Amino acid sequence: MVGARMLSVAGLGVALAGCAELGPDYQIPPQASVNAPAANGAFLSGGLAVSNAPLPDQWWHLFDDPVLDGLIEKTLAGNTDLRVAQANLERSDALLAEVRSRRDISIVADVETSYTQQSAQAVLSHVQPPRHGIYNVGITMSYDLDLFGAIRRGIEAASAENEAAVAARDLARINVAAETARAYSDLCNAGNQIDVVQHAIVIQEQSLSLTQQLITNGRIAPFEEERQRSPIEVNRSLLAPLRARQQNAAFRLATLMGLPPGQYDRSLLACHTPLKLRTPLPTGDGQALLKRRPDVRAAERRLAAASAEIGVVTAELYPDIRLGASIGSTGALTNAFSPLTNRFAIGPQITWDLHRSAIRDRIAAAQAHDRASLAYFDGVVLTALRETEASLDTYAATLDRLDHLEAARDEALRVSQRTEQLRRGGKVGGLVALDAQRAWVIAEIAVSLTQEDVNNNQITAFLALGGGWR
């Protein structure tokens, strides 16, 4: 008889469990910014400096610098921010597993024993009650039928939040890779600028030496020596800050790897060549960008979670039905596990919150949170597109400036070489030749400073493009 009742209750549970989830079935709203045609086409900025080729998975390989490749590999392995992001992801995995476990049968075991005496005065008795040992042993099992999908919607929300945590980890990886490339670029550009300034000092010292000879021979006024010493000291004053920048960049690289600054790689200070990107910067299109950028992915997943939460709260309007069963034994130890102490129970348990207005208020709050999540998602999409367009526009403008400065430097070099030939032929004086050399060095300094801007803008563009992670 009992078995038949259990089968009928279980059959009822299976039949009711086929009910669909409440709340909206998530999909990105058609009016979302991510679906706009302008968000899915080619980028407007960049011109010939960029191409529509897909961004590679590891964009720093485009610089073709093995040292940079090795540095990024080390920072991705040891960076402390990445360790935090990975731990947060593992915590999210555990929370998701806990939510999924709500679909399982709940089993609780109780074991209790005591030696007890009741209070005689509590029952208005003047006779001391007997003392005896009692016990309670039992197992209780229950299963939530989840008729209206509260658990399933909860799992949907937790899964979306977990995917947002994955995107947050990817965002941390992108930032670490970009900061590593930027620190290495700063180090190499500082080394390059040190070389250029030292070359300028050498030329200025040669000019000063020639000026001193002319003063000795009475051909020019003595104040010319003081006039030429001033720019030499100005250039010498630049060397210490440049060396400090180079050293500080090496410290940054060490801490990005998870090491103390004192353990920086001293061999890195030998880099005196700026990073070179020998092909147009690959960008892909807007559609690929929005799928790739972790912050966009995270915002979209949080929108999905907010949509699922509406279903979780809506299910509170309806009863929560559980199937339960328990078996155990309770009584005196002298009669343990006898027919007089054994017990069992089986049947459904229904919980229904009848405070409807409060539930509807929570539904309204969940719907408002969903609208806010959509607005935030739209904002992240628009920001991603703006950052990309702005970084590509700035990069193209800086690259154009570098082209003009390199042309001016090359022309100054040709003038310097021709002037030097004329000086050797006795057709111009040494000061004229040195002035031509100074003009070339000034142009070289301008090129070196702009080359640093180009590298920084390249890295900023790669960061805006989402870093190229799958």
Image (cartoon, rainbow, N blue to C red):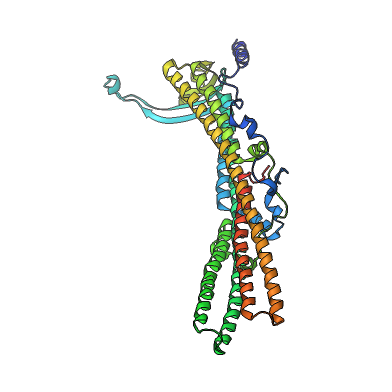
Front residue of this view, candidates 229 and 227: 227
- Nearer to us in this view, 242 or 184: 242
Residue visible at 50% across and 15% down?
319
Residues 112 and 256: in front is 256
Q: Where is residue 431, by image quadrant?
A: bottom right
Q: Quadrant of the C terminus?
A: top right
Q: Position of residue 346 (x, y in %)?
A: 54, 16
For this orientation, the residue located farthest to the front is: 427
Q: Position of residue 119 (x, y in %)?
A: 31, 25
Does the image show residue 75?
yes
Q: Residue at x 71, y 59 (%)?
A: 66
Q: On the rendered image, what quadrant is the N terminus found in? A: top right
Depicted 213 relative to depicted 362: above or below: below
Query: Which one is in front, 332 or 400?
Result: 400
Residue 14 image offset from top left, x and y in percent: 63, 15
Is 107 placed above or below 276 here? above
The residue under the point 67% across, 72% down is 416
Name of the residue lying farthest toward the bottom: 217
> x%, y% of residue 216?
55, 89
**Number of callouts:** 0
* Relative to 265, 424 lies left or right: right
Q: Is residue 58 visible?
A: no
In the figure, 198 relative to 405: above or below?
A: below
In the rendered view, would you say 467 is above or below 368? below
Figure quadrant of residue 382: top right
